[in-house]
Image (cartoon, grey):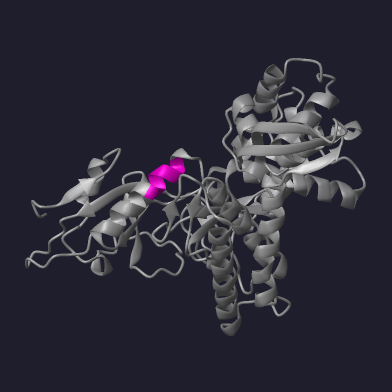
Amino acid sequence: MSSSLSITSAVPDPALLDLPWDLPLEIWPDETIAALPKGISRHLVRFVHLEGYIVAVKETTAELARREYELLRTLQRLEVPCVEPVAVVTGRVADDGEELAPALVTRHLKFSLPYRALYSQALRPDTATRLVDALALLLARLHLVGFYWGDVSLSNTLFRRDAGAFAAYLVDAETGKLYEGGLSNGQRENDLEVARINIAGELLDLQSGGRLDEAVDPVEIADGIVAAYRSLWRELTASETFPQSERWRIRERVERLNELGFDIEEMSIRTADGGTQVRIQPKVVDAGHHSRRLLRLTGLDAGENQARRLLNDLDSYRAMRGKSDEDEEMVAHEWLVSVFEPVVRSIPRELRGKLEPAEVFHQLLDHRWYLSQEQKRNVPLAEALTSYVDTVLRHRRDEVTVVGPQTSAITLPVAVVDDGEEDWRDKV
């Protein structure tokens, strides 16, 4: 290893020194490389095994690597969904003295997938729409903090399943810029137009390769991000005027924003026309209303839609047991240890890399509901869990790190131990 090698990192990991920085990234040994799906990139990117986790290494210029590293760190501090920057590596020199390209190292986002890995044979219309909706939400969050992306696309985004929807994470911030005074309408519109063109091109590429459902119109889906973004942006930022007698609309606006997953930092309320009209101007703080509430009550870190679903189950648990008047945090702890954690522990160890625990719980609740509708009875959670593991979870591909072709599996029942005591799962 060259003595000129420089690794800049906020939290240095000694394992970075063991990587073959004296070799061009394209010829790194196979035992170092992780077989993960990746999106399209203008630079060479490879996933690499580090001690205990996986990182993405991108060869670029020193200036771009440092700039993107700092931007990603800033976005993380602003709690915008993005990959975690690990290090900038410069001063790479091969054994023959040739200078090698600097590299940006980011941590691989567990359970995330590029859009090209979110289909088996053909990308369906509903999946394409959900991906675009997730990207529209990410773009709105970026614009709220004053970040101009400059290269919005599905390829520059990673997606994680989030209770029937997707959560989008920024991957490539190379073309981005943060403006402390916020973005102009022109900058936002330019990002939207770039997104529309890029998404249409990416979907047309899938279509030419026979990987797009015939019912999907690439241009219509791409136009959808504009409509989704503008509707969301209007809800987040537009002022609203109404008669003073309809003050209930203030609470309604707050609840709509909470339902979208956003909290209110402050709200300006002004009366006009002699006090007969009220005008409200919300100041949105950030997304994550439900995930923050779930984290506060239970310590579980989940996606926004996952958190909403788990909180709904928690609320149902309180109501069914007549504990609506009891301390919310105490009941939440009881639900956690008597419902959620036992479900997670019941998943066979070899299947725990399939999905995140919160996503498994969400899908289990859906599976139980479908079974109950089909059989016209209230199916106990224990029975639904066994059915879900056997008929659904075993046949999913792993999404924790490696995504490969689906393999055959032997279906075995989940063992339920009868110790003579009432089973916790019969109560929920």
Q: Main secondary structure of the magenta part?
A: helix
Task: Check the picture and name the quadrant holding the C terminus.
Answer: top right
Given residues 14 and 365, the one toward you in this image is 14
> In this view, which residue lies farthest toward the bottom?
208
> In this view, which residue lies farthest toward the top?
326
Which residue is painted at 29% across and 52% down in the image? Answer: 66
Which residue is painted at 40% across and 48% down in the image? Answer: 72
> In this view, which residue lies farthest toward the front?
274
In the figure, is residue 1 to the left or right of 338?
left
Given residues 278 and 216, the one toward you in this image is 278
Residue 226 visible in the picture? yes
In the figure, is residue 142 to the left or right of 60?
right
Task: Check the picture and name the quadrant holding the N terminus.
Answer: bottom left
Which residue is painted at 6% across and 68% down in the image? Answer: 96
Give the quarter of the image for residue 139.
bottom right
Residue 309 visible in the picture? no
Which residue is painted at 41% across and 61% down in the image? Answer: 175
Residue 221: x percent and y percent?
68, 70
Residue 120: x percent and y percent?
60, 69
In the figure, is residue 4 to the left or right of 384?
left
In the figure, is residue 351 to the left or right of 165?
left
Q: Is residue 274 magenta?
A: no
Residue 213: x percent and y percent?
68, 76
Question: Which region of the structure is painted magenta?
Answer: 71-76
Give the quarter of the image for residue 196.
bottom right
